[in-house]
Image (tube, grey):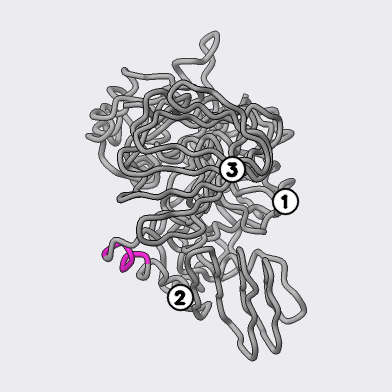
Amino acid sequence: MILPVIMAGGSGTRLWPLSRSNYPKQFLALGCGNDHSQTMLQQTISRLNGLGNAPCMLICNEEHRFIAAEQVRTLGAQHGGIFLEPVGRNTAPAIALAAIHALETAKDGEDPVLLVLAADHVISDEAAFQTSVKKAYEHAKNDKLVTFGIVANSPETGYGYIKRGSSLDDAYLVSSFVEKPDLGTAKNYVDSGEYYWNSGMFMFKASQYVDVLKKHNPAIYDACVKAMQVQNQDMDFVRVDKDAFMACPDDSIDYAVMEPLCAENNSDVVVVPMDAGWNDVGGFAALLEVSNHDENGNAFTGDVESVNTQNTLVISEDKLVTTVGVKDLVVINTKDAVLVAHKDEAQHVKTIVNKLKANNRSEATIHREVYRPWGKYDSVDSGERFQVKRITVKPGAKLSVQMHHHRAEHWIVVSGMARVTIDETEQYVSENQSVYIPITAVHALENPGKVDLELIEVQSGSYLGEDDIVRFEDRYGRVK
């Protein structure tokens, strides 16, 4: 049986301000792919339907755990565990954790075949994707380490390449992995027909990956084995030993495993061609390419009006955006930031993000709308000694029992029903009613109903930061 391993880490800074480190692109619905309503992670899970695979394992960062779990839940899918990386250490260690866990939990001595996927790729032809996966599975069952090579239709300089060797009917031995080329070299690669884009997707037996990692990169192997010796199960999540994993070298599967094997002229490394409308959406030019276009080559999402506009991407979250007499632009409007760039220069947006981080701007890492395991909040206004938030609490969810040293809060229920506890006194607050929480009062908010609870929170006080929260009880393991 195929065991999918979906790597959902990464910060996606090339799609700022849509994607930010606290809510990166794999968790966004970018209006591309076969189901525009689904996030990239959800699309990755959905395209596995029909393969007869086991529930997928997810690997993500600690700060994204509730986002990942909620997106799997709302999709109605099962998962085989969400592994939390204490720190990012690239793909080779992440896959090692999954492989070790797969072998630990396998039944009757089974050696699971891992299908390693990134959570942030677009694949428009799911049938072709599944055909390639089925071909790869036959090779992986026979002890081959398989990578998927994307049939190159243009000389891209932003991708690594795989050079194929001898033919195996529906696949090829891998001759070499090649770094990102310049444009002239990329043209030669495409013209030769012997090179594929490196997709970053792989398939192999769990034991085989562990064995070759131990041989070619024992430092990663030893650190991951040690990290897996201490596992803590927390709801949907699996945590490993933080200190052991932090000592692990940072390396990709290409450098740690695949390239050393190819250097040995190893006949166990195979590439299966894939022609499935693949795109890693590495920037706004790529997003424009995979989005639906009008007759002028534009892709608009949100409230957009245009005149004499061509080949332009506009995404607006919350207000009207208009364009007149422009072309080849990227215009991104979020609730707290606007990006305007020429589409050929949009790959340099990371430079802007670095400047924002250097200036300690919160916009570099978080959105105005912040997701929590119980729902979300949107900071709609703020000033000296006050802040206004719109809060959404999911049915059955409860915020932590908490207290603030420096602020009082006033809650006005807009829709739904709230169960509010203040210093052990419980009350129900319905639509158009409000309640006041004094400074230092121990309080909790819960949605006992079956529809979302919407309320307006007005904070007032000398300090309004999120770190002025003292938690006493929490359903989501956030009490230190």
Residue 301 in the image: x percent, y percent?
A: 67, 66
Q: In which quarter of the image is residue 63?
A: top left
**SS state under label 3:** strand
**Residue displayed at 38% across by 19% down:** 232
Which is closer to the viewer, label 2 or label 1? 1
Q: Nearer the viewer, residue 133 or 250?
A: 250
In the picture of the structure, the residue carrying the numbered disc 2 is: 183
Amino acid under label 3?
Thr
In the picture of the structure, the residue carrying the numbered disc 1 is: 35
Amino acid under label 1?
Asp
Q: Nearer the viewer, residue 148 or 54?
A: 54
* Above or below: residue 329 compared with residue 33: below
Labelled disc at residue 12? none
In the picture of the structure, the residue carrying the numbered disc 3 is: 392
Residue 93 in the image: x percent, y percent?
A: 35, 36
- The question of residue 357 being in magenta is answered with yes
Numbered range of the magenta stretch: 353-358
Cα gap from disc 3 to disc 2, whole angstroms: 49 Å
Q: In which quarter of the image is residue 452?
A: top right
* Above or below: residue 349 compared with residue 72: below
The answer to whether residue 43 is left or right of residue 161 is: right
**SS state under label 2:** helix
* Above or below: residue 362 compared with residue 473: below
**Residue displayed at 62% across by 42% down:** 413
Q: Do callouts 1 and 3 mark residues in contact (Cβ within 8 Å)?
A: no
**SS state under label 1:** loop
